[in-house]
Image (tube, rainbow, N blue to C red):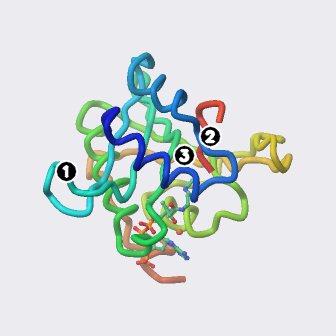
Amino acid sequence: MGVDDLDQVLAIERVSFPHPWSRQAFLYELRENRVARLWVARATDEPAAPVVGYLCLWFIADEVHVTNFAVHPAYRRRGIGRQLMGTLLELCRQEGATRAALEVRPNNHEARRLYEAFGFRQVGLRKGYYFDTGEDAVLMEARLGPEGSRPSDDAPVRSRGAAGNPRPG
Ligand SMILES: CC(C)(COP(=O)(O)OP(=O)(O)OC[C@H]1O[C@@H](n2cnc3c(N)ncnc32)[C@H](O)[C@@H]1OP(=O)(O)O)[C@@H](O)C(=O)NCCC(=O)NCCS
């Protein structure tokens, strides 16, 4: 993600979350926050192709914390979210990350299913994390094993049975 992508990123952000990150929040992550990494997915390989999704994270010591993640509504359910998550967890794993964490709203079943496919499991609740509704956040963690980050075969997704910054969820 670059500053030039922000108009498109913000358009996706605003239709994806009740309390979207501001331009300033993205700019802070892009320019100031030295542990932040932000990526976009584009519709094609062309550098100027439209942004269809993004994933933001903090990489601290050996831990990744996913801070923001969304796909344009018109492009959902095509595997873009899975590709973003898989690619970025694998990149971080190759750079030494051994675990990943994130918060998600309890009723965000689509995202939770995706996360479970990457080995994320609920490890706790953050009480009253979402100030808009007072909901608790589900805290999920995954170990990034030596075999790499990819959807596991036994996860529900396969069996078809998954800001103040950060504001995942
Ligand atoms: C969560 C999100 C990023 C997923 O992006 P996506 O590109 O649609 O996801 P994918 O197409 O890669 O889906 C991967 C898997 O996630 C699950 N999933 C995704 N959307 C789903 C839905 N609407 N219903 C049920 N499961 C869903 C499925 O298991 C899916 O695999 P399948 O299509 O083979 O069944 C997208 O729905 C989104 O932007 N949501 C709004 C923002 C948000 O909630 N972000 C997460 C914050 S924690």
Q: Is mark 2 within 8 Å of ligand 1?
A: no
Residue for point 65% across, 31% down: 164
- Residue, disc 2: 167
Residue for point 48% across, 65% down: 114
- Report, in whole angstroms, how far the alpha carbon at label 1 lies from the one at label 2: 28 Å
Relative vertical location of residue 117 with respect to residue 37 in this rendering, above or below: below
Q: Which mark is residue 67?
A: none
Residue placed most toward the observer, 109 or 8: 8
Residue placed most toward the observer, 128 or 22: 22
Do labels 3 and 1 touch, CB within 8 Å?
no
Residue 53, image x, y percentages: 39, 55
Residue for point 71% across, 45% down: 124
Relative vertical location of residue 83 with respect to residue 110 in this rendering, above or below: above
The tag earlier along the polypeptide, 2 or 3, is 3
* Secondary structure found at label 3: strand
Viewport quadrant of the N terminus: top left
Residue placed most toward the observer, 18 or 104: 18
Residue 161, image x, y percentages: 54, 83
The tag earlier along the polypeptide, 3 or 1, is 1
Q: How many marks?
A: 3
Q: Which mark is residue 48?
A: 1
Identity of the amino acid at label 2? Arg
Identity of the amino acid at label 1? Ala
- Residue, disc 3: 141
Around disc 2, counting alpha carbons within 10 Å, would you say few (fewer than 14), some (14 to 19), or many (20 or more)? some
Around disc 1, counting alpha carbons within 10 Å, would you say few (fewer than 14), some (14 to 19), or many (20 or more)? few
Q: Left or right? Give the position of 96 relative to 16.
A: left
Relative vertical location of residue 118 with respect to residue 9 in this rendering, above or below: below
